[in-house]
Image (cartoon, rainbow, N blue to C red):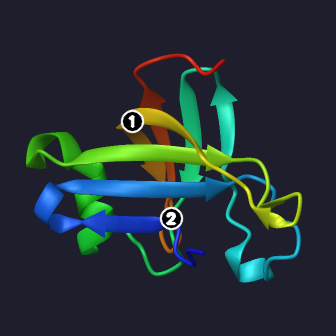
Amino acid sequence: MFSVGHVVLAQKKAHILLVTLNKQGRADAHKYMDHWIDDTHFHWQSQNATDPTSKRGDEIIRHAALGIDIHLFVRDTKLAVGKAAPFTYHGRVRYQSHQGSRPMSIVFGLDAAVG
């Protein structure tokens, strides 16, 4: 089972976001405020060490210009029937805006509506 929700595949020029929406049972420092804004926008919080000037923060903000794809996988809960719950792939997302630092609150746009 994975323990990091933001995986960088440098050779593939890709960032993979693995998001569990229900953070029940997680330490408060790891209860990131991830949620759907609407059917074409997702709010994601970075890890606590990420700020806009860090390598990861900058790569997210400037991903299109850098040729980096960001892929979003989401699941509701960590476990389903006693096993790791599957993620649903929502495709590539595009950076829209951000606020804050350590963690950064980022809004992504999706190419296709959720549903």
User: Quick one: SS at disc 1?
Assistant: strand
How many other residues sit within 10 Å of disc 2, few (<14), some (14-19) or many (≥20)?
Answer: many
Q: Is residue 90 left or right of residue 9?
A: right
The answer to whether 63 is drawn above or below residue 23 in the figure is above
Q: CA distance from mark 1 to mark 2?
A: 15 Å
The percent coordinates of residue 87 (x first, y second) are 61, 48
The percent coordinates of residue 110 (x first, y second) are 45, 27
Q: The residue under label 1 is which amino acid type?
A: Val
Q: Is residue 93 left or right of residue 39?
A: left
How many other residues sit within 10 Å of disc 1, few (<14), some (14-19) or many (≥20)?
Answer: many
Identify which residue is drawn at 46% across, 81% down.
Answer: 49
Identify which residue is drawn at 53% across, 66% down.
Answer: 5
Q: Is residue 99 left or right of residue 88?
A: left
Q: Which quadrant holds residue 88?
A: top right
Q: Which residue is mark 1?
A: 93
* Quadrant of the drawing holding the N terminus: bottom right
Q: Nearer the viewer, residue 14 or 1?
A: 1
Q: Which residue is mark 2?
A: 46
Q: Nearer the viewer, residue 15 or 41?
A: 15
Q: The residue under label 2 is which amino acid type?
A: Ser
The percent coordinates of residue 75 (x first, y second) are 69, 48
Residue 52 appearing in the image:
no
The answer to whether 58 is drawn above or below residue 40 in the figure is below
The percent coordinates of residue 86 (x first, y second) are 66, 51
